[in-house]
């Protein structure tokens, strides 16, 4: 995959978040997915979806931008 294709993928994923299309956002993930950060760790698409719902519940006007 080219650098430009990777960049477009990021923009596409961010657009899904901003559209609140979380089902499409987590669709490519499978149960082996592991996401880690300093604050949380998530495993699988259901866990990602749960974290997204908590984040939107806390910040309903959240809008992500790529710089």
Image: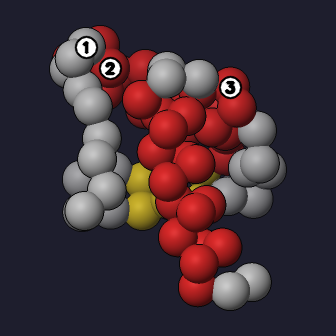
Task: Kindly identify which residue carries mark 1.
Answer: 60
Instruction: Say whether residue 33 is visible.
Output: yes
Instruction: Say whether residue 31 is visible.
Output: no
Q: Which mark is residue 8?
A: none
Q: Nearer the viewer, residue 17 or 27?
A: 17
**CA separation, marks 2 and 1?**
5 Å
Q: Nearer the viewer, residue 18 or 60?
A: 18
Determine the secondary structure under disc 3.
helix
- Quick check: marks 2 and 3 in contact, CB under 8 Å? no
Q: Which mark is residue 23?
A: 3
Q: Is residue 50 above or below residue 66?
A: above
Task: Kindly identify which residue carries mark 2.
Answer: 56
Q: Is residue 29 above or below residue 48?
A: below
**CA separation, marks 1 and 3?**
17 Å
Q: Callout 1 environment at 10 Å: few (<14), some (14 to 19), or many (20+)? A: few
Q: Nearer the viewer, residue 39 or 13?
A: 13
- Quick check: marks 2 and 1 in contact, CB under 8 Å? yes
Tag 3 or tag 1, which sits nearer the N-term? 3
- Residue 50: percent from the left, percent from the top? 50, 26
Q: Quadrant of residue 61?
A: top left
- Residue 13: percent from the left, percent from the top? 55, 47
Q: Callout 2 environment at 10 Å: few (<14), some (14 to 19), or many (20+)? A: some
**CA separation, marks 2 and 3?**
14 Å
Determine the secondary structure under disc 2.
helix
Residue at 52%, 70% (x, y): give it.
Answer: 7
- Residue 47: percent from the left, percent from the top? 56, 36
Judged left or right of residue 22, residue 50 is: left
Judged left or right of residue 1, residue 52 is: left
Tag 3 or tag 2, which sits nearer the N-term? 3
Figure quadrant of the C terminus? bottom left
- Quick check: marks 1 and 3 in contact, CB under 8 Å? no
Determine the secondary structure under disc 1.
loop
């Amino acid at each position: 995959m080219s650098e430009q294709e990777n960049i477009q993928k990021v923009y596409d994923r961010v657009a899904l978040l901003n559209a609140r299309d979380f089902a499409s956002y987590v669709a490519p993930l499978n149960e082996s997915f592991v996401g880690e950060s300093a604050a949380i760790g998530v495993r699988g698409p259901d866990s990602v979806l749960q974290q997204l719902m908590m984040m939107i519940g806390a910040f309903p006007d959240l809008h992500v931008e790529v710089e």
